[in-house]
Amino acid sequence: MIRFLLLFSRQGKLRLQKWFTAISEREKKKIIRDMTTMVLARQPRTCNFLHWKDLKIIYKRYASLYFCLAIENQENELIALEVIHRYVELLDKYFGNVCELDIIFNFEKAYFILDEFLIGGEIQETSKQIVNRAIEASDMLQEGDSSEWFEVELFG
Amino acid sequence: MKELMVRAIYCEMLGYEASFSYIHAIKLAQQGTALEKRVGYLAVSLFLNESHELLLLLVNTVLKDLQSTNLIEVCMALTVVSQMFPKDMIPAILPLVEEKLNHPKEIIRRKAVLALYKFYLIAPNQVQHIHNKFRKALCDKDPGVMTASLHIYLQMIQENPEGYKDLTTSFVTILKQVVGGKLPMDFNYHSVPAPWLQIQLLRILLFCSTIFLCRDVAALCIHCYCIQPLSSFPAILYESAKCIGNFVLSLKINLKYLGLKALTYVVQQHPKLALQHQMTIIECLDHPDLIIKRETLELLFRITNAQNVSVIVEKMLDPFLKIMLCCCIIYTLFIVLILFSYEEYTYAPDNEWFIETMSTVFSVGGDMMQPDIPNSFLKLLSEGFDSVEEDRKLRLFAVDSYVSLLQGEPGKLPQRFLQVISWVLGEYSYLREELEAATVLRLLAKLLDMKSTSSETKSWVLMAMTKLCEGGAGVSVTQEVCETYGSSLDTVLRQRAQELQHLSQDCELRARVLPRGAGLEPLEVDSSLSFLDGFVSEALAAGAAPYKAPHQRQEELAQAKALSLEPYGLSLPISMSSCSIADRQSPTLLSVSSGLSTTLKLDGVKRVWGREGYLSEREPVEESAHVEVPSPLQSPSQQGEADSSQSQTLTPIPTPQPEQEKQQLASSLFVGLGSQSSVCLMGKSESTTQRFRRKAKDLAVSSLEQTSQLSQGPAAANGICDVELTGSDMSETSPTLIRDNGVVAADPAPHEDPDKLKDLCLRTHLPAEFSGLCHSEITPLCTNQTLDFSACHLQKEDSLALVVFIYNSSDSDIQEILLELDSDELEVSCVCDSPVQEARSHSVAVCQYSLTVKRPSVHVEVVGTASYQFPAGTPHSAQFSYKLPLTSFIRPLTVSTEEYGAMWLDFSHDTKQKLTLISDGQEPLTDTLNVLKKKLQLHVVEIIGMEGIVACRLLRDQPCLMHCRLHAGTLSVWLRSPVPDLPDCLMYHCQRALQEH
């Protein structure tokens, strides 16, 4: 099970956080601090995995943004790395050549995509198309309440 | 509003508190239009967590949205439900979510499955009844829904691998389909078909541990870099070892990491596989990346054996100095390794080495270590080993080295180490006769004066001084110390100082309280705290409120603010009347004693015994020992191979200097890996099996030496391997055979013919005195070329008899079959005249045992080993295990209601749970109790209205009382017994019995 996902910039500024288990505010702050210092301190050309307490931390850097995922100890690191990558692919497909600013200004969208991809710490849907269709369908709500129409689009 | 909410989320993320907006998020989710609702739900799921009280306000919104006709709203509701939902509100929405499993849209079905998965995680009891629906989800035509259901299955199979064996084929079929590219194209991830799904399936199959896995799956596995599930299939291991080599060599750092990890798994099974990669491993040790280094150390840890332990330890200690922070975990592992290896007396070269290494470990590890490490070290010292002389030397050396450490610069030593030192000196410094107690006292007093010493350490020191201050030695020092700390603000310190003062003056009392060398004797603790009864009754008489057990308080609290689960407008009054008086009355009185015990117990112990109380703790050591690795026996042919490969790498080739050094290091690190002396470090918890295995090994070795004909050697060794395998196989399958209470009377389930015949044939050999009793099915235990072992058990009035049949299928008689049974939970006594049996050719020998329970556990297991000798003279042995449910030891206990009431008050161990009710008939309570009575052999004492009281006993004469009450459609059951663990185990069986019904 995935415990949490953090996105932060090279300066250590948090861009997105998602906790899949109940953690107190204080603990969260501590984790965020630990993660940023640990991950940012890594040299280039070192491996993408870390150990922290009883968790495995998988991180990957995309341009100036670090994606940092914590999984339980018995899980596979590489597949978690691919989870990060798939999420980036999803963001990329949605925003079209995603950059850090996209996530800053539309970060609720990033959350919506994440919610369609991961749920409760498990992977919900791995197909890019299906996730995108679900997101687009919900976005249609914004345009107007023509629910008949988008239902056909979404689930047809 | 929506914009504002988004900003609030952003603020929260930046670390500013935005709790004022929580309630607005809920309002937005409730009242907004569809889009606002979406942001509202998002905000709620980011702001609140499962235990937050505001979440209750969301329940109604979720209920409404789940019933909405708008699919998007349903989706949103399901998403938020599967992210967080208050546990006690689950019943309110469960039926709606269940209904969604049949929804025509797959996205809804998928989310519903994941929501149920979440429920399963937080409250497994509540979703028990819908297991069948999960099966339907598994067979769903949409792959997404099927994938989602795998999460649930992984969880359930982890908990109960036996229960889902029938699904194994389905999982394999799914996997085959996935690998065969049968899924839609959009499930491909960089041209690998659905890798997440594959991994998930492999993890499930790992728990099913099926033999269906074929080679193409193996190839795929490696393709997915997933070695772990494979480590249980030796045949594939050899193939994978080659691929792993490539991984480790890989320049890509992530693959290297994975390669090392995989190698660690593989090496656990076959240490000699590491030989191929030794040079690579050495290189990894010097890798700049700490994480890689750490993995390498872990790998080295796995291959430790008697010959290379000191090199490895040296190598490990060196990097620790630099990378302490990230190495805490392995550090612990490693120390436990040393401790245990020493206990085995095989690894450690000598006493000095051991003590010195431990000193280094303590001073390097310092206060980062878990407290159980020093504790187990001290335990090791105090329990000692087989020979008294060795113990004395070890302790003496410890005292010497610690005294010299204290004479040096004790200020630099970590607190934990100081605690260890002071304990050792207090306990054992009398061993060194020329060392005066006064000198030690002065050294210890010096510790007290140091600023850096923590108050915990100070109390250890004072304790040690108390032990030392015998016969007026160092009176001045003690006096001084007492004066300083007698008025300390720290109460513990003050108490210690008082003790020191009193005991140093009163020799007689001291000798009684702290007899020398008695640190080992188990302490007797009056857990019912009967000596406080007087105090309690006085307090009660003076008008104090009687004590209430925590769960009782909780229940009262819950009842006081019971919430309606129904949507507003439909609310029903919660039945307050269901709480009855009988339940209330009895606990209040009795819990006075049991409740107080939790707070006062520790004081009682500490006052007299101080910190040594820790030493009787065994669990931490045992737990950490699990990591260690059993190593398989290796047949001589493998051994030869290993030796040759080893000698190959060691052949002196003219190499440049650094290369040579590395090779030297390699040879010292990997020495002894390939030989039959491979690592045998099993945890203590498995000590019984380990003992057997070791015996088996010894036998194998000796047989090799004895027989000059080598051709027989491999056969013998292999034979033993086989036996072991079958033995463990049996233990896996046996529970299914004897699950339902074990007693299958004269009508056994339809068998295959040969089995039945054998069964019948064996049945005639049952001892005459058992002829009238019903017995369990005769279960085959293990079989080899000559002997068939099978067993059954019989329930007698006051004991449980285990009968083992040994059928000799060879043409020659076998004499002197020595059968030994052992068990962690049971007491096994042999009924026959002698444990040695003789089996004539083609006939059956019968051994009889009587079993009683030592320590209750849900299932108890008897492990047996049989060693026997052919007329030709080659010794053989076979192992088997026999598993029984605890219910076989349960007998009805006939008591009257008054006696029941009296007993109820005396018992201190209890557990409480809600069970499902059998509600087919008119009277659910009576029906349920009758089912329990039939299945578990309980005695129903009386049924009064909504309540029933039931009694039973565990052989011999360990009563357990059960109190049942109908409450809101469930049966709340309360079990009490004087035996720890018994209520929990029995509760488990009650639950099972009702489920199976």
Image (cartoon, rainbow, N blue to C red):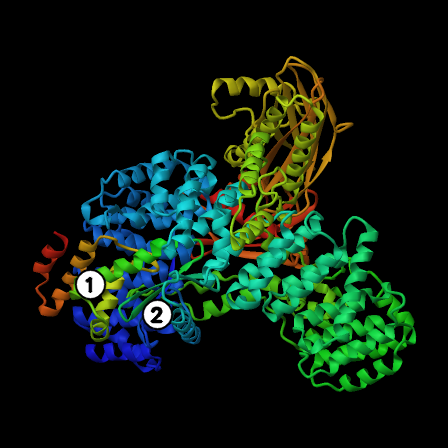
Q: Residue at x 43, y 74 (%)?
A: A30
Density class for disc 2 (Cα within 10 Å; few <14, some 14-19, many ≥20) is some
Q: Which residue is mark 1?
A: A92
Q: Secondary structure at mark 2?
A: helix
Could you tell me residue A124's position as x and y percent? 28, 55
Identity of the residue drawn at 58% across and 28% down: B718
Whole-angstrom CA distance, mark 1 to mark 2, is 37 Å
> Which quarter of the figure has residue B311?
bottom right
Q: Nearer the viewer, mark 1 or mark 2?
A: 1
User: In the rendered image, which quarter is residue A41 located in?
Assistant: bottom left
Q: Contact, CB < 8 Å: mark 1 with mark 2?
A: no
Three-letter amino acid code at disc 2? Leu
B381, above or below B31, in the image: above
Q: Is residue B542 visible?
A: no
Question: Which quadrant, please, contains the N terminus of chain B?
Answer: bottom left
Which one is nearer the viewer's eye here, A106 or B403? B403
Could you tell me which chain the residue with mark 2 belongs to?
B
Which residue is denoted by mark 2 in the rendering?
Answer: B56
Residue B982 sits above or below residue B590 on the image: above
**Picture coordinates of residue B269, whole percent (x, y):** 52, 42
Of the 4 image quadrants, the one containing the C terminus of chain B is: top left
The residue furthest top is B811
- The local crowd at label 1, few if under 14, some if 14 to 19, many if 20 or more residues have their Cα within 10 Å, is some
